[in-house]
Image (cartoon, rainbow, N blue to C red):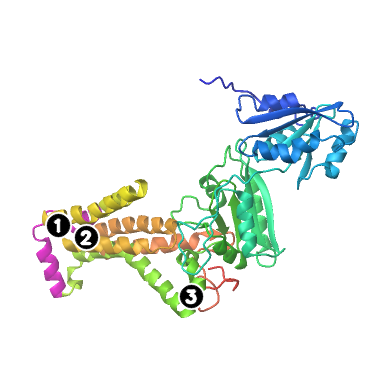
Amino acid sequence: MYGFEETKTAAAARPENAPLPPLRSAALEAAFRRCADFESRRLRVGAEGSEEVFVCWLDGLISSFEAAEELLRPLCEPGRVGAADAEGIFAALRGGAVSCPSIEERTELGALCEDLTHGRCVLVSDALGRALSFDVKSQAARAVAEPTLEKSLKGSKDSFVESLRLNTALVRRHLPTPRLKLAEQTLGRRSATRVAVLFLEDAAAPETVAALARRLEAIEPDALVSLGPLEDRLVERPLSPFPQLLHTEKPDRLARWLLDGRVALLVDGVPIALALPVSFAAFMTVTGDGNMNRLVASLLTALRYLALVLGMFLPALYASVASFHPEMIPTRLLLSIMEAKKDVPFSTGAELVGMLVAFALLQEAGLRLPNPVGDTVSIIGALIVGQAAVEARLVSPIAIIVVAVSGIACYTMPSQDMGAAVRLCRALLLLAGIAAGLYGVALGCCLIAAHLSAIDSFGQNYTAPLSGRKGGGLLKLLTAPRAGDRRQT
């Protein structure tokens, strides 16, 4: 439609053992043909201006002013590069004729194109068939701001951005030690996305780092522009609803995970960090636990587990008891429930399923709409629609209370991914309770526990510390962890 023909690269057409063709500026111009942001200049450099070089960059990743000040101006200054031939010019540039912090020599077109797309300036000599890549990247990135997903009362107020190098710098500010190791790898045949692996040399298990390296090497995506494809290939059970990688947008929280011996992943263009290995208990802690009194933080952790039980089991237990085991309800409460339901035409199970669907629709609408409109929709749905449904005798007040308590309990989950898994399990348990009462709920609970026990995260069981051989697992589960205590919970 726009005149972009489908072409094969020279690297794909060349046999495996064939010698590399000499690098030419024409090949680079052909690779970036029809790219409006591709800027280039041909300059004559040397003692007598007899050697021609080709300088190019991608506008936006590098500003024209920075390219002119750091590279073009030094090349054009008389006597700055005193060599007479191309080999001498390259030696002078590598020796300090320009003040760029990083200079790399390239002989392959693919590596040169990758340098350009990652914000470097390139100088090509057709006479030598080689090129130099200069680091003159501009800081055209979103400024570091306060986190929007993870709120902290006493912790730091910085969050990750879309620049990989800026994100690694934020982590090093919290861990200023040479033991913090960083390895980079490029993933994606088309996107060429840089991925950084971070770990503390004296804290992370070597087998975990090696296992992660093997899995990253086995990944060959066509493009990597989000975390979804990367997560699916890293975890052992991608179809499980429970998250198997930790997510955070806060550098201080990632630093705590690194101190605990975990390995982190940062992806260029994504303001979220991943960490592994994980356990179920790791998703029940928040950033502020390490900054609070240990007793208070432990009580809040226990409150989150109570909210987990209420959010997952309350609708299923109410449907089971009200439909199959009414004798378990106290008499006065049972009479109150019967009085509220006498004019409702639907069964208890149908009420709860309908309310959960309506609750999910309101939640989805609140997330997708702009903030002012989303808040208005939530208020209208919660107050007007809910009150109208009760007055119209479509649902009973007790059903609304049960669904509301369960929904609020799910909102207390520190991890959004874990909250989504809890909501899915809540729906499945509700259907089991409607079908078989408490026996169905008990069977569903056993299946969930068996599934959690079968998940392995890079050598660590998902149910740790409850599944460990040492005692005191429940105490460790409810005790708020501290950074650097080497407990991967």
Q: Is residue 339 visible?
A: yes
Upstream in the sequence, badge 3 or badge 1?
3
The foreground one among 468 and 332 is 332
Question: Is 471 drawn above or below residue 410 in the view shown?
Answer: below
**In percent of the image, x 76 and y 36: which residue is there?**
73
The foreground one among 156 and 181 is 156
Upstream in the sequence, badge 2 or badge 1?
1
Where residue 485 sits: x, y (%)? 59, 74
**Residue carrying label 3:** 292
Q: Secondary structure at mark 3?
A: loop
Q: Residue 337 in magenta?
A: yes
- Disc 2 to disc 1, how far (Cα)? 9 Å
> Label 3: few (<14), some or many (≥20) within 10 Å?
some
> Which quadrant would residue 8 be assigned to in this image?
top right
Circles 3 and 1: CB atoms closer than 8 Å:
no
Is residue 457 toward the left or the right of residue 337 in the image? right
Where residue 192 sits: x, y (%)? 63, 40
Where residue 63 sits: x, y (%)? 64, 38
> Label 1: few (<14), some or many (≥20) within 10 Å?
some
Circles 2 and 3: CB atoms closer than 8 Å:
no
Q: Amino acid at mark 1?
A: Val
